[in-house]
Image (cartoon, coloured by chain):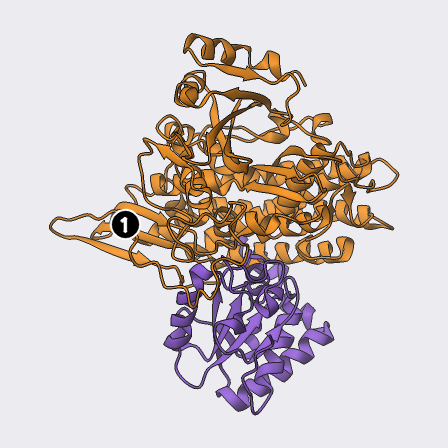
Amino acid sequence: MNGADATYELRVAFKQAGVRMRIHRRSRLTPACEIGIRPPHWANASRAARAAGYRFSALWAEERGHSLLLTALLERAGEYVALRTRARIAAPSVPSISKEFPAADRPERHARDLLGLEFEGHPDPRRWTRHQAWGASEYPLRRRFPVIGAAAAGPTPPDLGYPCVAAQGAGVFEIPVGPVHAGIIEPGHFRFQAVGEDILNLEERLGYVHKGIEKIAEGRDPDGLARLAGRISGDSAVAHAWAACMAMERAAGVLPPPRGLALRAVLAERERVINHLWDIAAICNDVAFGFAYYQLGRLVEDWRRLNAAVFGHRLMLDVVVPGGLSTPLAGDAASRIVDQCAVTRREFESIWSILQENASLHDRLAATGVLAPQDAGDLGAVGFVGRASGHDFDVRRDAPYAPYDALEMNVPCLAFGDVAARARIRHDEILVSLDLIERLLASVPDGAVRNDFIVPRGESEGLGIVDGWRGEIVTFVRFAADGRIARFFPRDPSWLTWPALERLIHGNIVPDFPVCNKSVNGSYSGQDL
Amino acid sequence: MLRQLFKIQRVGLVTEAVVRDDAFELLGEEARRAIGRRFAGSLAIRQLDAGSCNGCELEIHALNNAYHDIERFGIHFVASPRHADLLLVTGPVSRHMEAALRRTYDAMPEPKLVLAAGACAVDGGEFGVSYASCGAVSNVIPVDGVIPGCPPTPWALLNGLLALVGRRESQPTRPL
């Protein structure tokens, strides 16, 4: 990995913009190249990076001695660069990069709410993750803030005073929806301004399921962190656990055995297939096409049952552990998985062809909820949301990690950006995943599935980047000198796709909101942390 | 359209396969009888995610798939707490959902039952009590029954429902 060469252009751009920087010869955040930036040059650096074609990936901060250390992870053509700067804790403030990178808007507000880091010139001064559980001048991720919070807090009041965007004019009305929704789904608030059925504006207000994941991660051991990571978003149990374990393994210099890595990919692709099948089912259900809902739901149940039989858990929770996997793939398990791929391919294709022929379904999905490629690029949308709007970034192909580094793979991409395209991408990805599972199992190495995880001696940090079924997951882990977790930041892809929903809903009608929302299917829990 | 009908015919009723799954079927039948006795044949559930990771919701959805199809036992999910006999709560109660949970509970007509489903709802699970989490559902509203598991399987969910509605007299319990 030669990060320094890959960022040559960026370094030249920085020099031309007068950015004072320090390139770390040995990046502590591989595969990213680590570049230290002096605080006054932070905004200049972000402008230069934006102009050079970099995409915003993640942003997090942490308390380090007498300062707050801020990291912004950017990516271009599969090369990651981690820009870092510091702010004195006495008056912590850095320039905002949200104007150059709109996707940094909420992550910056999250860092402000939890660490008290001010972002000068931020276009939106409102709180984001904070509701009423802690005060405006309290910062849960500061060392001195107790994990239990303020003593004798009493019941937490509802967050009534949040200043949502308002609209006025003849015939304009507002529809507040949530946090409690009408179905079996996660809580969040949506505020619509509408005229008749036409949506003028949608504003998301999330943070309702904020569970303090970053704070309660502190002090955990590696196994405990992997367990927590699996529960960031239950539908991404494998992907998040993998990203967390990868970060810990890089920090500790531990490598899982080849068999463990190959099987992690089998698990991750199974997770992708299950969630995509279920999403297509739910998209169809949201336009009242029950046939697809029940037929595809049947396949999902088949896959969950085989998960339970083969890996001991229907959602594959706690199977990915530091150093490898918790369960070997024994007996005829591999052949059962391969057999299921063949059956599913046949069944799924026959159901899909029926969906394709259904004119009323097509009428509801095509040209609905269009995310223009330009918007997807500005927002840095990843996963199937980006891939349905012309941005085909896929960590597995573009910044490959084992075992994907040894696999040729095709990444489906479309440019229409409507609900139909996001369903179609899922269809195509299911077929790719079935193929990947078969190829992985055809050549799965023998041997152990887990190596001992040896806790690093002294402080260390690591970055895990994997492609979950929603897209790129970035996880940062820092070990304290005692071998316990000092900082954990998991960036679910939903951080980059929720803003897309606000954009793609323009020009649609209120009754099409559920299907538009489902076609993006952001995780509430994964973004609220 | 014809192909759709052929597909439906060829797949047939997968629900019948579950009839051979004695445990689920026996549980379901027992639940149906209990619901017949206590709820005039129809148990209306309002599900509320009070802070879960969404894992429990995936398994609650699975109760409605063609294999389990729990509506055949008289159990169905409703959109409004005002229509509900039972509140099925998942997740540790995040402090940001605390007020919403209380209001949902208050909106239900008497008599009402509360079932806390999943390890987090039972005792806080992996998240426990913190500045952001109230932990167990029983720390916020009275709870009549609990279903352990992370997440509980569809079978465990049905079993937990039966354990609660099968009881003639239910006393609110606070597991913590």
Type of amino acid at the residue the image marks with label 1: Cys
Q: How many marks?
A: 1
**Which residue matches tag 1?**
A164
Residue A226 drawn at (x, y percent): 68, 47
Crowding at mark 1 (Cα within 10 Å: few <14, some 14-19, many 20+): few
**Above or below — where is A501 with respect to B1?**
above
Secondary structure beneath dot 1 equals loop
Residue A105 visible here: yes
User: With A38 as the anchor, is A160 left or right in this view?
Assistant: left
Looking at the image, which is closer to me, A131 or A359?
A131
Is the C terminus of chain B in the top left, top right, bottom left or bottom right quadrant? bottom right
Q: Colour of chain B?
A: purple
Q: Toward which corner of the image does residue A178 lie, by quadrant?
A: bottom left
Instruction: Report the residue that reaches farthest toward the left.
Output: A170
Q: Which of A103/A443 is in front?
A: A103
Whole-percent x, y for residue A121 in the image: 32, 31
Q: Residue at x 80, y 46 (%)?
A: A334
Q: Could you tell me which chain the residue with mark 1 belongs to?
A: A
The structure residue drawn at horizontal position 61% and vertical position 18%, both measured from the top left corner, is A24
Look at 52% across and 52% down and name the residue there: A212
When the figure is inspected, residue A304 is found, relative to residue A13, above or below; the finding is: below
Q: Does residue A490 appear left or right of residue A132 in this picture?
A: right
Q: Is residue A277 visible?
A: no
The picture's colour for chain A is orange
Q: Quadrant of residue B123?
A: bottom right
Picture quadrant where residue A417 is located: top left
Looking at the image, which is closer to me, A53 or B173?
B173
Residue A376 left/right relative to A472? left
Q: Position of residue A252 (x, y in %)?
A: 74, 34
Query: Could you say where residue A422 lies in the image, as x and y percent from the top left?
Result: 47, 40
Does A505 appear above or below A294? Answer: above
